Amino acid sequence: MPSIVRVLFSRRMLVSMLMGFSCGLPLLLTISVLQAWMKEEGVDLTVIGLMALVGLPYTLKFVWSPIMDRFTLPFLGRRRGWMLAAQVLLAASIAALGLNNPAANPWLVAATALLVTFFSASQDIVVDAYRREDLADEELGLGSSLYVNGYRVGMLLASGGGLIMADHISFSSVYLIMAGCMTVGIATTLAAPEPEAAEGTPGSLKEAVIDPFVDYFARRGALWMLAFILFYKIGDQMASAMTTPFYLDIGFTKTEIGAVVKLFGFWATILGAFLGGLVMVRLGINRSLWIFGVLQAVSTAGFAVLAQVGHSVGLLAGVIAFENLSGGMGTSAYIAFMASLTNKRFTATQYALLSSLMGVPRVLASAPTGWAAKNLGWFGFFIFCTLVALPGLLLLLKFAPFRPAED
């Protein structure tokens, strides 16, 4: 236990958490907060809907990640130089977004929001690479869990805090304050050491673009691991896509949903991610993926039980606690696993590609969930989501059996 305590309170873990905060802060500033501002200014709903497209850089970040593996800026080193540049430009673009007028020029707002997401995605690329290179393999689980928790706190500050502040001050002021909060990431970048560069880093742009893919697909089980990344959380994501209509349909009030699902659920997720990190220190990433995956599937089945029982705040709290605890643990293991797959010679490119793939099922699998819930009923829908989670677990047999041969 003392070794876990030493690791938990180390400089590396603090950096992981603060960098997570810096990465989580900008995300909802171009989604929910911006939507609220545009709605208040009377912008047409069609335009507000199209604003979702400014999030494309998060999906396409692997396109320019090789540049960050190949080139080193003339200050702070290969990782910290790019981090500082991305964070300063991100803070400036958030401030610029706040100085715009959505009603007078919504397309200028869209262009500025696109800059925010581009620099935010660029920060994600380098922070993910830095975390992989700064942490030892056995620290990836706990470091990833603290990163996730910092990320969620940043999101909560931007969305919940931003909307609450917007009731008392202008949205422009909110965005200027959020730009100022980026100093947390900037200060962390300046104070943190540069991780040691691996031997054989790309010597040309061609090597930076091609070698990461050659390196990855030369591994045994490479395709199985990609399939696992696509399917591990698919059942959980499909269920989550329809939970709000489900709660309303079986009689929960919006106040009950806000208090139990959003506020109570937030802290359950934070606790789950933290516990997941501690478990991974003891059991390793592969075994944790098995345990957390089973818990995720069981927690999804909990919604089927709630569908049968109907309106019960106590049962809702129990289901949400279990679902968010297991989801927080599963997400931490999932992110740690992806980091462990990367070669430190081209961490930025490989992690950007894998994390982009991670978002594919969230979009594609969520699309038919309304149709499935309508035709299967709520009980049948959540049982279906539970069963959909099983193939992702079974894929672990191909490259990460619970009991390795050497056991």
Image: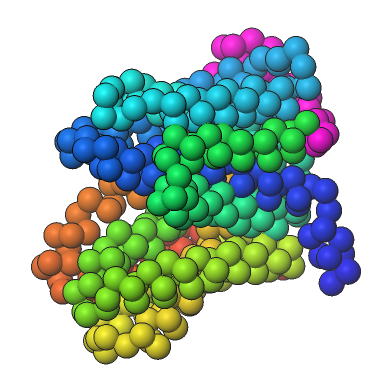
Identify the magenta region: 191-210
Expressed as whole percent of the image width and height from the top left, the position of residue 164 reads 44, 54
Residue depicted at 68% across the width and 46% down the height: 18
Name the one closer to the observer, 88 or 44.
Answer: 44
Count of marks overlaid on the render: 0
The answer to whether one can see residue 401 in this image is: no
Q: Quadrant of the N terminus?
A: bottom right
Residue depicted at 55% across the width and 68% down the height: 267
Decide if residue 281 is on the left or right side of residue 210: right
Expressed as whole percent of the image width and height from the top left, the position of residue 259 reads 41, 73
Decide if residue 270 is on the left or right side of residue 33: right
Decide if residue 102 is on the left or right side of residue 44: right
Name the one closer to the observer, 215 or 362.
Answer: 362
Expressed as whole percent of the image width and height from the top left, the position of residue 168 reads 44, 50
Q: Is residue 284 magenta?
A: no
In the rendered view, would you say 398 is above or below 312?
A: above
Write down the quadrant of residue 34 in the picture. Answer: top left
Q: Quadrant of the C terminus?
A: bottom right
| Predominant SS of the magenta segment | loop
In the rendered view, would you say 108 is above or below 367?
A: above
Write down the quadrant of residue 19 in the picture. Answer: top right
Expressed as whole percent of the image width and height from the top left, the position of residue 388 reads 32, 64
